[in-house]
Image (tube, rainbow, N blue to C red):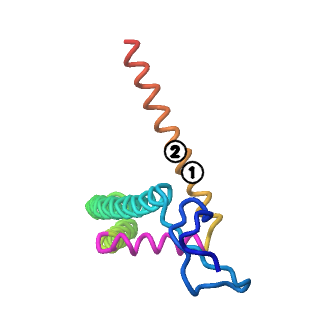
Amino acid sequence: MPDPKDETLPEGTDSIVAGASTENEEALIVREPTARDKALEKIKSGTGKLSGQAADKARGLVGQGLERGGEALANVSKLVGDTAAGLDERLGEEYGEYARKAASALEDAASKVSAKDPDELIEDTREFVRKSPGVALAGAAIIGFALVRLVKSGLDQGRKDDEE
């Protein structure tokens, strides 16, 4: 077994653990963490903290979106409900009843959206993507296209304002 104070140990090696051996009866060499190892560990812990903060921020934004979406659906429900009486007079009670049923359905949807937890919504979205990946991909493509058009129209509007 090599002497622990032997100068031929690899660089960064602290000592040889006495009595430790592998199948080949070679000594197990214990290495001190190098500056590189310490830096990598620091980066890994920083990455973990950042991802946790990003997840918390995303949950907060999803929560705000749920709240605003619920409010928007409630407003649309009220609008549809308010038009039901006018539909009764103009088109008949049958159409007014359709409007009242739609308003009720929108109100139910608004209360469900408002009551949802962001984690529940994220899990529901994951489950939907697992069940219908094609629909999810098509939806993502449509949303991406709409965002590009929205940004492009905003840039075009900014150029027009600069020219004037």
Q: Identify which amino acid the numbered label 2 is placed on.
A: Ala
Q: Which residues are magenta?
A: 114-130
Q: Callout 1 environment at 10 Å: few (<14), some (14 to 19), or many (20+)?
A: few
Location of residue 117 (image quadrant): bottom left
Q: Mainly helix, strand or loop, the magenta region?
A: helix
**x and y percent of residue 81 in the render?**
28, 64
Residue occupied by mark 1: 142
Figure check: 143 above or below 11: above
Q: Callout 2 environment at 10 Å: few (<14), some (14 to 19), or many (20+)?
A: few
**x and y percent of residue 85 in the render?**
27, 63
Locate residue 128 relative to residue 59 in the image: left or right.
Answer: right
Figure check: 136 above or below 117: above
Write the residue at 52% across / 40% down. Answer: 148
Please check the rendered image and state whether residue 138 is part of the magenta-colored stretch, yes or no.
no
Please check the rendered image and state whether residue 126 is part of the magenta-colored stretch, yes or no.
yes
Write the residue at 54% across / 80% down. Answer: 17
Query: Mark 2 touching mark 1, by CB under 8 A?
Result: yes
Mark 2 element type: helix
**x and y percent of residue 109 in the render?**
36, 71
**x and y percent of residue 67 in the render?**
28, 63
Q: What count of labels does the image hold? A: 2
Q: Is residue 21 visible?
A: yes
Location of residue 18 (image quadrant): bottom right
Query: Residue 10 or 153: which is nearer the viewer?
Result: 10
Locate residue 18 relative to residue 84 in the image: left or right.
Answer: right
Write the residue at 55% across / 74% down. Answer: 4
Write the residue at 56% across / 44% down. Answer: 145
Query: Residue 91 or 26: which is nearer the viewer?
Result: 26
Q: Which mark is residue 146?
A: 2
Mark 1 element type: helix
Locate residue 43 relative to residue 22 in the image: left or right.
Answer: left
Location of residue 159 (image quadrant): top left
